[in-house]
Amino acid sequence: MGILTLVLTGLLIWIVVMANQKGDSFIKGGGFQEKTPLDIARERFASGEISAEEFDKIKKNPA
């Protein structure tokens, strides 16, 4: 019984750590998903790191 509790606790900790490493995309998408360049540009625009002109330029050529 003690070993099962230990294994389940370890599994739960591992899931939490993995979710935190990938950000909240694990929770939103139902699995691990990488951010696209456009996702990153949206975040940077929302935080004020880049201007609207820079964001529009990235949207036209996301690669």
Image (tube, grey):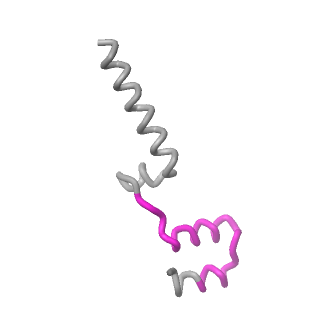
Q: Main secondary structure of the magenta part?
A: helix
Q: Residue at x 70, y 69 (%)?
A: 49
Residue visible at 52% across and 68% down in the picture: 39
Name of the residue lying farthest toward the top? 1
Q: Nearer the viewer, residue 3 or 12?
A: 3
Q: Is residue 7 left or right of residue 14?
A: left
Q: Is residue 53 magenta?
A: yes
Q: Is residue 48 magenta?
A: yes
Q: Please say if 55 is above or below 4.
A: below
Q: Which residues are magenta?
A: 33-57
8 vs 24, nearest the viewer: 8
Q: Indicate whether 56 appears above or below 32.
A: below
Q: Nearer the viewer, residue 55 or 8?
A: 8
Q: Residue 55 location in percent, x, y? A: 61, 79
> Could you say where residue 36 lies in the image, as x and y percent from the top left?
48, 69
The answer to whether 53 is drawn above or below residue 24 in the figure is below
- Answer left or right for 50 relative to 57: right
- 21 or 45, which lies in front? 21
Name which quarter of the figure residue 54 lies in.
bottom right
The residue located at (35%, 19%) in the rendering is 5
Residue at 45% from the left image edge and 44% from the top image edge: 18
Determine the image quadrant of residue 15: top left
28 left or right, relative to 21: left
